[in-house]
Amino acid sequence: MHVTHLGHACLLIESGGARVLLDPGSFSGFAGVTGIDAVFVTHQHPDHVDPERFPALLDANPQARCYVEPSVLETTLQDSDAAGRCRPMTSGQLVQVGEGLSVEPVGDRHAVINEALPRIGNLGVVLRAQDERTLFHPGDAYDAQPGDVDILGLPLNAPWCAAKETVAFVQRIDPRVVVPIHDGLLNDTGRAMYIGQVQRFGPEGLEVRDLSDGEPVEF
């Protein structure tokens, strides 16, 4: 498995002979990405799906299939030409990408931001390929049950979470490796602080791989 962090919540994954892009949002640098087989969007917020740049992404990848949390089609992409190319995901229903990669949507709703805002849908995705690492991208929630996970895309900071919840999430999922994501609101000092909390209080033997340089890393 090769993993590239393209900023904030966006990951480019190469696994099982397939190339998959996750959550290409407004804080992420995915311009020029081509050759992808599928795009997955966990929920409707623009930092996870950029309505301005998303159509161009699909135009540059005409072969790519697009899968989204259902409310994305009714909100962020409602007036976009890209909506016609996207299919709604269902929690627990496997999506096969190519011959070697399966993607399982998991979860239900976005984490609570504050009590004045209604909770929206959120589907994390678990990527599995035979004889390769398993990766879980949770979107914006810490309550999904992804099963055994080797690599966790870990949201570091958001209006909906605190560091104690981040650490508890890592402890519960118990991955071998954490890749920090959802960091677009942090400066370097804050980012280092959050990563330090995860390293110090995460499960024993946990490896934190910071991919903020945008270079692909093989796992």
Image: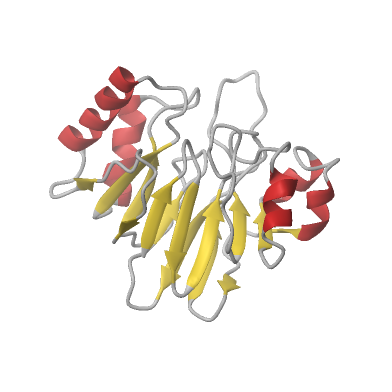
Q: Position of residue 100 (x, y in %)?
A: 48, 78
Pinpoint residue 168: horizontal percent, then vertical percent. 30, 37
Question: Quick check: 74 left or right of 60?
Answer: right
Q: Position of residue 154 (x, y in %)?
A: 38, 42
Q: Is residue 23 visible?
A: yes
Q: Residue at x 34, y 62 (%)?
A: 148
81 is higher (above) or lower (below) than 14? above
Q: Residue at x 42, y 30 (%)?
A: 183
User: Residue placed farthest to the left in the image?
Assistant: 204
Quarter holding the C terminus is bottom left
Q: Nearer the viewer, residue 25 or 140?
A: 25
Q: Nearer the viewer, residue 118 or 185?
A: 185
* Residue depicted at x 46% and y 38%: 7
Which color scheme did the rendering employ for the protein? secondary structure
Question: Looking at the picture, does residue 88 appear above or below residue 211?
Answer: below
> Residue at horizontal 80%, vertical 51%?
83
Q: Is residue 106 left or right of residue 152?
A: right
In the rendered image, the quadrant that contains the N terminus is bottom left
